Amino acid sequence: MTAIPSTLSVPHLCEPPWAQLDAPETLAQISEALEPSASGQPRRRAVLTIDGVHCAACVISIEAALARQVESVSVNAATRRASVVFNPLEQPLSGILRAIRGLGYGPRPLARAALEATAQAGRRMTLWRMLVAVLCMMQVMMYATPRYMAGEGEMPADIHRLLIWAEWLLTLPVLIFATWPFLAGAWRDLRHRRIGMDVPVALGLIVMFVASSLAMHSDSPQTDPVWFDSITMFAAFLLVGRWLESAAREKALAGLADQLAALPESVLRIEAEGRHTAVSPEALRPGDQVWLLAGALIPADGRVPARDVRVDESMLTGESHPVLRRAGEPVLAGTALLDGPVILTVERAAQSSRAREIADLIAQASAARPRLARLADRWSGPFLGGVLALAAAAAAIWWVIEPARAVWVAASVLIVTCPCALSLAAPAALLSGSAALSRQGVLLRSPDALEALATTDLLLFDKTGTLTDARPVLRRIVRLSEQAPDETALLGLVWAAEGHSLHPIATALKDAARERLTAPELASWEARIQDVTEHPGEGLSGLWITPSGPVAWRLGSPDCDSLESKQTLIALAFDGQEVARFELDQALRPEAHEALETLRAQGLVLGLRSGDQPGAVQAVARTLEISDWAARQSAHDKLLDLERLQGRGLRVGMVGDGLNDGAAMARAQVSISFAQATALAQQQADILILSDRLMPIAVAHRQARRSLGVVRQNLAFAAIYNLTCIPLALAGWMPPWLAGLGMAGSSLIVVLNALRLGSLPAAWAIPPEPMGTIRRPESGLNT
């Protein structure tokens, strides 16, 4: 493992040796490998934390600078994170970091323990700047108060001048040290010919300081105004507001990616000679065996082959009820083992575990910007340009009316109109809302998922594995002709055929074959079934190699429709002729009725689309009181049906878990899937439910509507604040210190309002399963 040099913990002093991050082993730890491009070039995704990002101008600047160097880049000002997809052969990660640093920002890879010192150092420096500003403000106010209280001519001129000089000296550390990030940010923006939120703040500070410094050297220092108290008070308010805003942001992000990626510091690996060696989880490789005691965190994805165990998966799914894992079933890194001691056989290294995948998913989601945030960013640039023009006009007008007030009126306009609250209104609320859902096992893969879900009119559900249990049960086998193979041969054939599919029905048939046939029988059938092809929504086809020659077979829905059979029917045909049928029972998920009733009560219209036979689909639809249903739907049929509904002006969401649902999920306004779904369904999903329950969908819909409501509140407040304060500043009724308090306070109010979304109301709690029982999952998470 390549070590990260310690110099990375000292940001902005010298360029860190980023070239070492391009080493394959290091790059694998701090970025995610993606599918190769159409030309076969490698692609990776890295999530970066970027210090110094505060506004839309920062976002636009970074994205514009990297647009020609990387495949895609998305920067979120609320989280100060960037998601970058790049080709490591054409543009190494070190080059991307240097490009960002060249703009004046401080980039670093996210979720790297060795780099945590960098973040800690940044937080300490921010705290020091705030403390210096507050302490100097208190001292300056102590010197300024006697000047304000003394009547004209009551204070000797030399004492008056001495107090002003003391104020000037105490303002210097505030201007040079405490507000340095704003001054540096403004210079960076101007140097790159853009206007960011630091520009009006820095201009206001500099204008007031220069004007005050000139006034203190005038012939009448007792009458010419100085604003050192306003400068220090404004800086203190601004830094306190930024500090509280940063703390609120960290609170919203706390416990997400870092919590999910948490692993024990060391584990006991069983060596070949039988002795136990303490190693870090990162050192584990597939095939290693680990000794675990009851209560231990599982360090890597693997299996416990010798016995059944109970596992607490609350960190992944949000559910605290224990899960029973049978001997040989998968267990996941980051979950807690409730029974022990046991021996775990590692199947995936810690760096590629399911928990790490989820942590990376959360990091990527927090780096992306939702549509509402992009809309606010689009308007913030012109708004800032208008602010500068308005401040210049105010200074010119007041110079004619009352020259002594022109400078501080212009400074007040610059400060009070800074659109920090506008830029934070949407991303802060959506970040906080999605963080609360993440802690309940609901992950948002798309930055626009909350907004899309909140505005959905119609939600379409798949049936098998979505509304019904993920694993049906084979009820009986019906032979339709005397030429059909016996039951043993039929089970052997479906065992070998369905081994190529992850569909829940395929899993049910494989389970039935495994229970009734011996291992040698199953192995012999695997060699006789060849050229297996899966047809999404239609079944499987292939060749059966027999002594008399190959036989073409097909497994799928029967050719005839019937409303009489309430079971799921799978037909086996040889050369186009049906020879046998498999009847499967599919039980509804225990909470399906309650979850759908809750969704209806929240104003959603529900529909059912399934590739199953009409009888089975109708039975489910009738039980769940769904009037809009369709059976024997292929992937293309579902897509056409969804597009037809969208053509009527409806915003349609799709809930599915199979290959048959992938096309419709990609086209829907919002798509929802489960952690046990097929890889295609998970990739197309905007929202991923980590448990196998349906109630989280209703909770996510409530939270989405609640989040959108808070976004609207924040945007309305930001608009009202600016419409109210700008006229006051123009009229000369708002001194600079009060303008600074207003700007910092407005940003803080927006963030605090967003933090209300950080916890779900108790009334929304997902009903627990009956106490005293252990949940037996129908299928485990994909590993």
Image: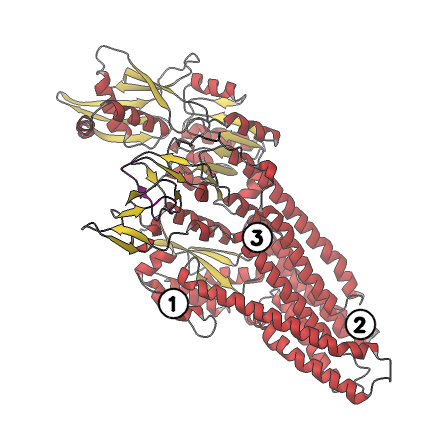
Q: Position of residue 79 (x, y in %)?
A: 53, 56
Give the residue type at disc 3: Arg
Q: Position of residue 365 (x, y in %)?
A: 48, 49
Indicate left or right for 177 with 671 as reference: right
Local SS, label 1: helix
Label 1 or label 3, whichever comes before in sequence order: 1
Q: Quadrant of the N terminus?
A: bottom left
Please report the residue visible at 69 percent of the width from the left and 54 percent of the height from the top. 718
Tell me the amino acid under the disc marked 2: Trp
Badge 3 crowding class, 10 Å Cα cut-off, few under 14, some 14 to 19, many 20 or more, is some
Q: Nearer the viewer, mark 1 or mark 3?
A: 1
Of residue 744 and residue 730, the one placed in the foreground of this image is 744
- Mark 2 secondary-structure assignment: helix
Sequence order check, earlier mark of 2 and 1: 1
Query: Is residue 303 within the magenta segment?
Result: yes
Left or right: 423, with 291 as reference point: right
Mark 1–mark 3 contact, CB under 8 Å?
no
- List the residue tagged with mark 1: 18
Q: Which mark is residue 374?
A: 3
Q: CA distance from mark 2 to mark 3?
A: 36 Å
The disc label shown at residue 566, or none: none
Q: Which residues are magenta?
A: 293-307
Residue at numbered disc 2:
398
Q: Is residue 725 above or below residue 506?
A: below
